[in-house]
Image (cartoon, coloured by chain):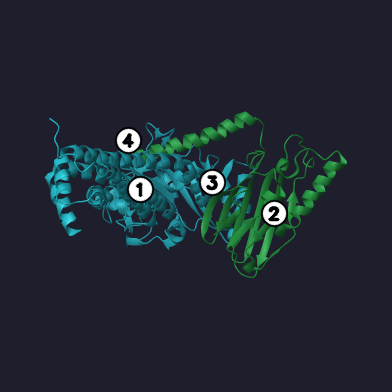
Amino acid sequence: MSALLRIALLSAWNRRLTLGLTLLSIALAVTLLLGVERSRVAARTSFAQSVSGTDLILGARTSPVQLLLYSVFRMGGATNNIGWDSYQDVTRHPAVAWTIPIALGDSHRGFPVIGTNDAYFEHFRYGRGRALELAEGRPFAGIFETVLGAEVARRLGYRLGESITLSHGSGELKVAEHGDKPFTVVGILAPTGTPVDHSVHVSLEAIEAIHLDWQGGAPMPGVQIAAEHVQKFDLSPKTLTAALIGLKNRAAVFKVQRHINGYPDEPLLAVLPGVALDELWRVVALVEQALIGISVLVVAVGLAGLVAVILASLGERRRELAVLRSVGAGPRHILALLALEGGAVTLAGMGLGLLLLKLLAWTAGPLLEARLGLSLAIQGVTLAELKLLGAVALTGLAASLLPAVLAYRRALSDGLTPRL
Amino acid sequence: MKTLLPSLLAAGLTLAAGATLAHGQAHGHKHAPGHGAHVHGQARLLLAVHGNTVQISLESPLDNLLGFEHAPRTPKEKEAVEAMLARLKAPETLLALSPAAGCKAEPAQVSALPGQDGQDSHGDLEADFSFTCANPPRDLEVKLFTAFPRLKRLDVQLATPAGQAAQRLAPGKTRLSW
């Protein structure tokens, strides 16, 4: 057997270029397959991690998935806000334990600004019920004070005491700056791996204050209210984008939801974040399946390439195999030799693919985490991935049996009597 | 990749929105505010578990449970309504929580019977069940499909100590666990 292995190795080394390229294509295919699977799982876990302990999300009537996306993940925008009075009404419902108001719409250098209150720092939970922690400083107390998410501070290099200005909207328009009312950084949150890291937190009053001298989304010409004078105005919020609601008793969740959805004065919507997330996955599942399907096809192409290369090599190895037969190798040995080659290339390709994936996660992981908040934690191979790898290995072995069987069935004399 | 995820989500949203819109147009009748869509063959089951108490609500078009939605006119239809009510009044036969939990059902609250709320074309039924258990229950066997053969799909929303989830049940898949 070891002699056979040696022969196989030496013979393969002789054809190292073609086999090497085949190996690379299998490796890339495996990297793609596992990469797609891994990002799918990472997206699900990181979404699921982002909100915990919140029983309901309150917003204007829209699609539940959309409300979840903009209120928790800051993806897309709200079509409507909700009135402060309606929000107050909901908070007075006897089953409600706490609420976190959320006002969106401004940004700081591309990072969304969230107007909220102390409840955010007290009640917001992520992961498995973990509370927010301040890495430095304290929650905001004054109007022009802000608390930054970990990623905002890290990427823009902000420290405590720094002065920043907010922009109106998503920040692409340079004219819409709230430049006259700068904010002081008073706190920086510890990293959470959720959208909180990418957020700039200010008080609800601050959101009102910076828009005092604004009308219709632009500064009113000739009107300027200096930062030190805003206290004289009524800064109580008029509208909100959304609110997170925690209940005293989970069993009441559908009752409160029904109450909110039937609220007579304003079309409101309450969604269960976990339910909305599942609905989102049900929709996205189609796309996920398409991506997995494409990766499976790419693996099939890689394996077909392997079979083609070994089949083609049968022609050039006619002499080699004939000589082997003439010195006593049985057809069974030829079969083993070729199957061994195909199997080894498949397995080596899978190994290289895994290595490439590790490398990719290691180099591109931090970028993905910073840009998308997706944490592709450099994890071990999961059960689902093992199943995929097993399927690839089995298919590879089965496929390499094809050229092996062809060679097995050739006559002993084949290749020894060259036709002229 | 930076633009891929949001655009995938956007595509998904459009799909979902399209589906709802298409349904609304196809059916073309007005829903009362706060009520779900009215699709025959489908119903909603809401299940909330807190400690040893379980609250379950069933929201279904009457057609699924009766085969008609108007006020009962013939003796046969009246009989059907009575039979349905009798079924709903015995929640244990419709919703079987894990036997180990030792759950007791309280009398079910049934609202909106056919013809009662003045609408004649489409009627929905809402039934609220509540259970008190000796131990926290971990699963539920839904027997609604055998009791009401016209019911083909059940969209379930769960709020349990294990978290929130949406699941879909059908005559071949009747078990929920958390």
Task: Inspect this view and state whether residue A92 appears.
Answer: no
Which amino acid type is marked by label 4?
Glu
Of callouts 1 and 3, which one flags the residue occurring earlier in the amino acid sequence?
1
Of callouts 1 and 4, which one flags the residue occurring earlier in the amino acid sequence?
1
Residue under label 2, please give it.
B128
The N terminus of chain A: image quadrant: bottom left
**Name of the residue lying farthest toward the bottom:** B134
**In contact (CB < 8 Å): disc 1 and disc 4:** no
The chain whose colour is cyan is: A
Q: Is the residue at mark 1 from the same chain as the one at mark 4?
A: yes
Instruction: Find residue A172 and name its label.
Output: 4
Please, what secondary structure does the residue beneath circle 1 have? helix
| Residue at 51% across, 60% down | B162
Residue under label 3, please give it.
A84
Which amino acid type is marked by label 1?
Ser
Residue under label 1, please give it.
A39
Give the percent coordinates (x, y) of residue A181: 34, 44
Dot 1: chain letter: A
Give the percent coordinates (x, y) of residue A98: 53, 58
Task: Inspect this view and state whether residue A30 appears.
Answer: yes
User: Which residue is nearer to you in this view: B163 or A244?
Assistant: B163
